[in-house]
Image (spheres, helix red, strand yellow):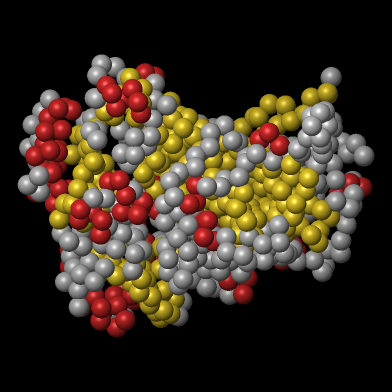
Amino acid sequence: MAKILRRFAFSALLLPWMHTAQAANPSPACSVDYQVNVKLANGSSWSMCWEVRWREGIVFHDVTYTAPGASPLLILAQMNPAQIHVPYDDNGARYHDETDYGLGATKDMATLAADDCPNGKLLSSNGKAVLCQQTRATGYDVKYYTQAIQGQALYLFSVSHVGEYNYIFEYGFHGDGSLEFAAGASGHLQRFTPIPGRGEKYGWPLGQMKYGISHVHNFYWRLDFDLGGADNDAFEELQFPPEDSSQETRVLQAQEFGTETARTVKPDDFRSWRVKDKAITNSDGHAISYHLEADPAHLFHGPEYEPFTQSEVYATTYKPCENFASHNPTINGCADNVSAFVNGESLSRADLVVWYGQAFHHLPRDEDEPMMDTHWSRYFVRPQDANAENPLGDSAGHDQGH
Amino acid sequence: MGTSTGNAVLWRGLLGAAALLGASEAWAAARTGYDPLSTDEQSLALKMALADARITGPQGQSKRSEVLMVERHQEDKAAFVATPTLRRADVYIYLYDSDRLLQAVVNLPKNAVDSVITAQKVQLPPTETEGSASLTLALGDSKLGPQIRDEYFRSTGRKLTSASDLVSDALVFRSDAHPGAAGGAARDCGLHRCTQLLLTSRDGILVNVLPIVDLSRGAAVGMTSFAP
């Protein structure tokens, strides 16, 4: 189709994304057992490598999307949880689960059984089934009167035990190139108090003379974007404040950051961020990019000794030793937390890493016993002009032009 | 815990796994790039690190040490493009007497230890051996031990007869991460290697206390509970 031929307006032989696309497919930097290559019903496909790491749990590498009939596009060199920070409202505990307990050690990562992965496939690391691979229907991708495209996505998830909690890390890889990140928490509550004054102040009554203590799960994610390759990426903030005091109109403000930065959400201005490639455009001449919209239902800004909680989104230059949002090993001069990774280095055409922290304040309830149902923290990273039009076409799968 | 015990436990685990799975395990030979280390690779990396003078020297000067972790070295991401055969492991060993973490980067194809780095105030997740040692120290403490037993009785209605009545999960505890819980000797935690224990009964009933144990000092140093 003409659309495919004009998808990327560049010389294929000379551009840097080519070697990374080749690295992901057909010669990925991992063996067959640690590859995922899935073609969805709509014709798009995803490929990546995965590994289990002691602290991070499952880590994905070279995450590559191929739209129907198009060339592979490397999106992320690596993606994984970068911390689970759990401060309790009564200051009785402040956990850093990923670095201080670990999500991927033998004792921490659940062995999955067939029942954990209905209609799916279990993937094993060193003989232990730790990752469930499923394709699931996701409802309408497109609906227009009598026309419709039914969505399908690849899902991959693992389960890690931390004390009474079971954390479920699930990734959705959608047919339109969107990425879905979800952290679920289930199991048992970890802390209670029998003292009414304390329980009523910091928690919620559960049964008789027992109060579950409210707490926050701050899920931090490390997203090492290599959009079309490691070079030439830029980090841009988009927001839409009112144009004047009438509040009747809103104007786009786009700011590209020249140096590393820490940013907070601003939902009343619809603030969001994107990583764009400054060398690759789609056939409309628009820079290809991936767009992060934060979910700011709850925000957590903690005490001074938790500086990493003061912002939700960080953009830093890539460094192999910067791996965790907090309690990062300070080996070889590396900083302790993501707020200190922001130290004035240039982001201009840099190899950059985006960090996102999503908070969930858990108010206990009677239904949390005997076991609590899974509460999810979820967000999406979606293509913004990575294609010149909807890569899934119209309901008949045709290129509609534009 | 201790040099012989801790290493022996990990060694037994790794070598046992290798023996169980077979040395000619198909995946062991096929590992490449981002693949996690096979059990054979972990065993080899540990063996090479423990034979290196930069490890044996400081380890010999410490009466107590523990192998904390053996995993694939996090390479610069361009590494596999430049050197597709690159296969390196990190071996982390903690020396309690000097509160130092040793990181050996082992180059498996070259059969060499590329580097050994020493760090302080870097605390990796506790091993199962450390978790067990922490529980023993907490239960043996003249103040914390009775408190844990009381709370076990209050939670379960049963008397705690031994440490095996409890399921214990250990996290690293750093005083700078929770100053409110780090009074007295617990203030050293972070420089010292400390754990905080999450306790339940064998039948899954929460024991609502959080003992803090200083493994460097070899003593329980604090506990937070439901009360202020």
Residue B120, compared with residue A325, is above or below; it is below
Compared with B37, B146 (above or below) is above
Spot occupied by residue B226 in the image (x, y as percentages of width and height)? 24, 33
Q: Residue at x 39, y 21 (%)?
A: A365
- Residue in the foreground of this view, choosing between A257 and A53: A257
Residue A101, position in %: x, y? 35, 50
Q: As drawn, is B135 to the left or to the right of A189?
A: left
Outermost residue to the bottom = B53
Image quadrant holding the N terminus of chain B, namely bottom left
Q: Is residue A337 visible?
A: yes
Relative height, residue A50 to residue B167 (above, below): below
Residue A180 sits in quarter: top right
Measured from the top left, where is residue B170 in percent x and y?
Answer: 27, 48
Q: Extreme front residue here?
A: A245
Residue for point 80% across, 42% down: A252
Question: Residue at position x 36%, y 44% from top?
Answer: A94
Between A104 and B101, the one nearer to me in the picture = B101
